[in-house]
Each structure stands twice: as C-alpha cells, then as structure tokens.
C-alpha cells in the first residue's frame, strides 16, 4: 500500500498540519500522521521511518518548529523524498525553523517549503505530485485542480470592476 507519512514534532503542530491532510483527503491519497521528535524521541523517529518504509511509504512530510531538525533526521534514515514544513514558534517565529530545515548538507536533501499553513498545504501538493509520477489518475486530478483554481481566479476577476484613475 502506497501512502504518505506526516510526522510532527509535537501535538501543537496539528493545527497547521491538519491543512495538509485536508488536501490529501481531497485527492484520496492515503496517509498516516504520527508525533515524533528528532530531539525528544530520536529512537522512535528512526524506528518509525524504517517501519513506514516496509509498509510502503513513498514520501515523508516532516513538520517542526524552532530547531526543526526533524526533516533532516528523517532524511538521514531514508532515500525516500522528505518534505520539510517549518512551523512558527520560538523567539524567531519560524525563521529559525526555516533555516534549520533548509540548511542540509550536500547529498542529504530535504525539500523545504514555506513556513506555516502555506507550507503544509504545498507539502501535500508536492507529495501528490511525486506520487503522480507513477499514477496517471492522480496526475489527472492535479490537472483538474489547476483548471478549477484558474477558473476561480477568472471568475473572481470578472466580478470586480477595476478602475484606474490618473489624478493630476
């Protein structure tokens, strides 16, 4: 069974990462969510990654704030794609998490996305895009999603009268 794994550093991350699962549900993509910390439960994280690979995980999404080493810890245990979602919190309000997630050594990649909600949503889309490389039905769903988003923008723009003024 192919699925996506979402690993959060703490329960408080669910507020943001639930956005990720909503997108996965819309595309009927299987996923599982666990809480495991790179710092507080490193052995559990390591064991989970190995177990998830045996069960068929194709992509890991790791969400953490502050020092945010979770994505890197996961990447060190697998050759499957790892997508990092830095979260807000701490003195630097997410910038620390962004820098911790994006600063990976050469040969140990983590696809790092935006801080917070946009990152969570885009992590789901990126994971779906990865799965769609071997799943044409999923690829077609992505294309339809893009078409619907474009139609909404066009509809929204037609409902707003734009006036350009040139005061002298």
Image (cartoon, rainbow, N blue to C red):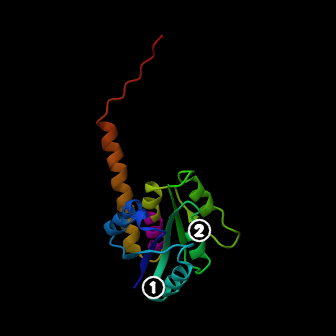
Total residue callouts? 2
Residue, x 58% and y 57% (percent of image)?
98
Magenta span main SS:
helix
Q: Position of residue 12 (x, y in %)?
A: 41, 63
Q: Is residue 106 above or below residue 102?
A: below
Residue ID for mark 1:
56
Residue, x 71% and y 69% (percent of image)?
106
Cα–Cα gap, marks 2 and 1: 24 Å
Looking at the image, is mark 2 or mark 1 nearer the viewer? 2
Closer to the camera in the image, 165 or 20: 20
**Span highlighted in magenta in the image:** 124-132
Q: Position of residue 109 (x, y in %)?
A: 63, 70
Residue ID for mark 2:
69
Q: Position of residue 146 (x, y in %)?
A: 39, 57
Work out which residue is located at the far left of the displayed protein and give it: 159
19 left or right of 98 in image: left
- Helix, strand or loop status at disc 1: loop
96 left or right of 61 in image: right
**How many other residues sit within 10 Å of disc 2, few (<14), some (14-19) or many (≥20)?**
many
Does the stretch in magenta take in 125?
A: yes
Which badge, 2 or 1, is on the more N-terminal residue? 1
Work out which residue is located at the far top of the displayed protein and give it: 168
Does the stretch in magenta take in 93?
A: no
């Amino acid at each position: 069974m192919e699925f996506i794994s979402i690993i959060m550093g703490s329960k408080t991350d669910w507020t943001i990462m639930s956005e990720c699962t909503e997108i996965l549900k819309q595309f009927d993509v299987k996923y599982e969510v666990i809480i495991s910390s790179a710092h507080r439960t490193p052995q559990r994280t390591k064991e989970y990654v190995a177990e998830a690979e045996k069960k068929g995980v194709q992509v890991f999404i790791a969400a953490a704030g502050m020092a945010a080493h979770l994505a890197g810890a996961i990447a060190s245990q697998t050759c499957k794609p790892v997508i990092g979602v830095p979260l807000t919190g701490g003195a630097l309000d997410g910038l620390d998490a962004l820098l911790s997630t994006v600063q990976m050594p050469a040969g140990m990649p983590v696809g790092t996305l935006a801080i917070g909600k946009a990152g969570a949503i885009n992590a789901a889309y990126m994971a779906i895009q990865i799965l769609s490389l071997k799943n044409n039905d999923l690829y077609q769903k992505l294309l339809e999603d893009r078409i619907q988003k474009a139609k909404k923008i066009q509809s929204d723009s037609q409902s707003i009268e734009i006036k350009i003024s040139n005061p002298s």
